[in-house]
Image (tube, grey):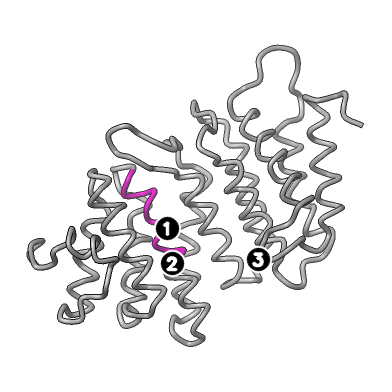
């Protein structure tokens, strides 16, 4: 379909009303093409904003699985903006599928999870913002997706906690969290911890991987990955103390906070 078929500036100016005259399949194709654009206005302001709204409102239900499959295929895309906007679309698709039982088969969600979980902890371009490309935010966007997967696939909740631990402790990075990535990870961890049926040892067990990554640290400057880890633990501790506005404090919050505080005493030995 021609990119001129939909007048995106007009749709954006009108608050993104759904273009009823455009077949959903054609609209999905155009949105998917725009979601890999290096132009942040096309990718973020138009395509993602429209897709997230129309998925939430149910306008794209008939192409929901196709949208999820396309997004998942982009975790191996050579361009960073294509990879980092894929989890945002998956977040919307998985959330919509969970909201409307039977809309998306579980095997599709498992398929998407497999692609996402292979990508998230190893993505090396974790910049939050680029002056040319705009928002990239692999860590934050991936965190949002983990929270969505936790609700849709509750049996994966301990894996998702460990996935977040692997992401925050990933050593192959030269990017220090500067765009509240730590807070987005903390919020995702809170939502995973809210999934019913999580036992105390499951709620705290993922922190063992964090402790193992930090083990052996000594004098000298704090590595960037360790700074990111400590920042996330501090943010998580605050979230556990205050709770989320829409969900409150998760079960085992006190135990998780205590474990996080133990790790924070490594750099901040003066903590009570």
Q: Which label number is shown at residue 246?
A: 3
Q: Residue tagged by mark 2? A: 92
Between 120 and 7, the one lying in front of the other is: 7
Segment tinted magenta in the rendering: 81-92
Crowding at dot 1, Cα within 10 Å, few <14 / some 14-19 / many 20+, comes out as many
Q: Residue tagged by mark 1? A: 88
Crowding at dot 3, Cα within 10 Å, few <14 / some 14-19 / many 20+, comes out as few
Q: How many marks?
A: 3
The answer to whether mark 2 and mark 1 are in CB contact below 8 A is: yes
Q: Residue at x 20, y 67 (%)?
A: 29
What x and y, as percent, mark residue 1? 9, 68
Residue 28 lies in what quarter of the image? bottom left
What is the magenta segment's predominant secondary structure?
helix
Left or right of 189 on screen, residue 143: left
Q: What secondary structure is found at the residue carrying circle 3?
A: loop
Q: Is residue 157 above or below residue 215?
A: below
What x and y, as percent, mark residue 105? 46, 82
Q: Is residue 218 above or below residue 204?
A: above
Q: Earlier in the sequence, mark 3 or mark 2?
A: 2
Between 92 and 41, the one lying in front of the other is: 41
Between 125 and 16, the one lying in front of the other is: 16
The answer to whether mark 3 and mark 2 are in CB contact below 8 A is: no
Separation of disc 2 and disc 1 at Cα?
A: 7 Å
Crowding at dot 2, Cα within 10 Å, few <14 / some 14-19 / many 20+, comes out as many
The mark closer to the camera, 3 or 1, is 3
Q: Earlier in the sequence, mark 3 or mark 1?
A: 1
Quarter of the picture holding the C terminus: top right
Separation of disc 3 and disc 1 at Cα?
A: 20 Å
Q: Residue at x 26, y 51 (%)?
A: 36
Q: What secondary structure is found at the residue carrying circle 2?
A: helix
Residue 46 lies in what quarter of the image? bottom left
Between 118 and 35, the one lying in front of the other is: 35
């Amino acid at each position: 379909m021609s990119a001129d078929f939909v007048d995106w500036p007009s749709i954006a100016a009108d608050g993104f009303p759904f273009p009823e005259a455009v077949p959903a399949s054609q609209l999905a194709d155009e949105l998917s093409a725009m979601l890999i654009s290096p132009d942040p206005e096309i990718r973020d302001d138009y395509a993602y904003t429209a897709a997230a709204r129309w998925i939430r409102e149910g306008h794209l239900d008939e192409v929901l699985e196709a949208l999820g499959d396309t997004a998942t295929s982009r975790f191996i895309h050579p361009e960073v903006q294509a990879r980092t906007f894929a989890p945002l679309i998956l977040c919307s698709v998985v959330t919509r599928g969970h909201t409307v039982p039977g809309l998306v088969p579980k095997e599709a969600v498992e398929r998407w999870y497999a692609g996402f979980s292979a990508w998230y902890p190893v993505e090396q371009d974790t910049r939050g913002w680029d002056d040319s490309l705009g928002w990239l935010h692999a860590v934050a966007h991936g965190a949002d997706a983990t929270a969505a997967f936790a609700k849709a696939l509750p049996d994966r909740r301990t894996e998702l906690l460990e996935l977040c631990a692997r992401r925050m402790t990933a050593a192959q990075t030269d990017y220090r969290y500067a765009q509240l990535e730590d807070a987005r990870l903390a919020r995702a961890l809170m939502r995973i911890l809210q999934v019913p049926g999580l036992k105390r040892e499951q709620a705290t067990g993922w922190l063992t991987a964090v402790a193992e990554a930090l083990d052996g640290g000594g004098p000298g400057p704090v590595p960037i990955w360790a700074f990111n880890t400590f920042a996330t633990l501090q943010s998580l501790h605050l979230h556990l103390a205050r709770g989320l506005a829409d969900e409150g404090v998760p079960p085992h919050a006190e135990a998780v906070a205590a474990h996080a505080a133990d790790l924070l005493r490594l750099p901040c030995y003066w903590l009570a």
